[in-house]
Image: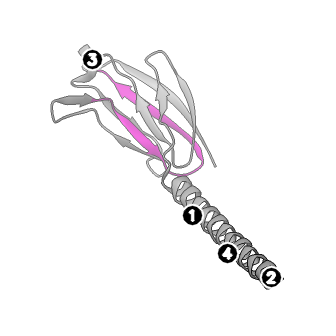
Amino acid sequence: MTRFRTVAAISAAALLGVAVLAGCSSSSDSTETAASASAESSTQMLPPVIITEDQTTATCAVGNFLDIVIPADKLAGTTVGTDQPELVELTQAKEEGGATFNPGGTCLAPGEATIVVTGPDGSTRDIALTITE
């Protein structure tokens, strides 16, 4: 009978140990998962709003980036401007590290703005931009 109690006590201790470990690892895993998800969502970048050559309107949310597509043969000498610099911050086309980048920008605040794209030949194209929350 003493042997039976010893085996029962060892079995109970083993089960208790497994339960404690399972509880700890489960709690730790969910905490790590939540922390990982939180960090991932706070550092996740939204894709840019692509404005193609034939578009005259576009919509973006505050915080979104814009990519204004310009044909490679017209990229040099193309400039962009806006009538609402407090709503949209624009960047000019550039060459950096052997790569060329389209003009673009960042949507700063809700409202409506016009982006004027001026080609190297002096031609212009207006893009009506709506910025949402």
For the residues labelled 2 and 1, say whether their Cβ atoms are less than 8 Å apart: no
Query: Looking at the image, is mark 1 or mark 4 earlier in the sequence?
Result: 4
Residue depicted at x 80% and y 78%: 4
Disc 1, SS: helix
The residue segment tinted magenta is: 101-119
Q: Alpha-carbon neighbours of circle 2 within 10 Å: few (<14), some, or many (≥20)? A: few
Q: Position of residue 75 (x, y in %)?
A: 26, 22
Rendering quarter of residue 26: bottom right
Q: Is residue 99 visible?
A: yes
Query: What quarter of the picture does the N terminus occupy?
Result: bottom right
Q: Amino acid at mark 3?
A: Ala
The three-letter code of the residue at mark 2 reads: Arg
Q: Position of residue 8 (x, y in %)?
A: 79, 77
C-alpha distance separating marks 1 and 4: 22 Å
> Disc 3 on helix, strand or loop?
helix
Q: Is residue 23 above or below residue 119?
A: below
Question: Is most of the magenta stretch helix, strand or loop?
Answer: strand
- Residue at x 73% of width, y 71% of height: 15
Q: Can residue 121 be seen at all in this image of the molecule?
A: no
Q: CA distance from mark 1 to mark 3?
A: 46 Å
Residue linked to disc 1: 32
Few, some or many C-alpha atoms within 10 Å of disc 4 (few <14, some 14-19, many ≥20)? few
* Picture residue at 56% right of the left edge, 29% below the top: 58
At mark 2, the secondary structure is helix
Instruction: Kindly identify which numbered label has been placed on residue 109.
Output: none
Q: Which residue is mark 2?
A: 5
Residue 43: in magenta span: no
Task: Give the residue number, with chain letter if any, for mark 4.
Answer: 17
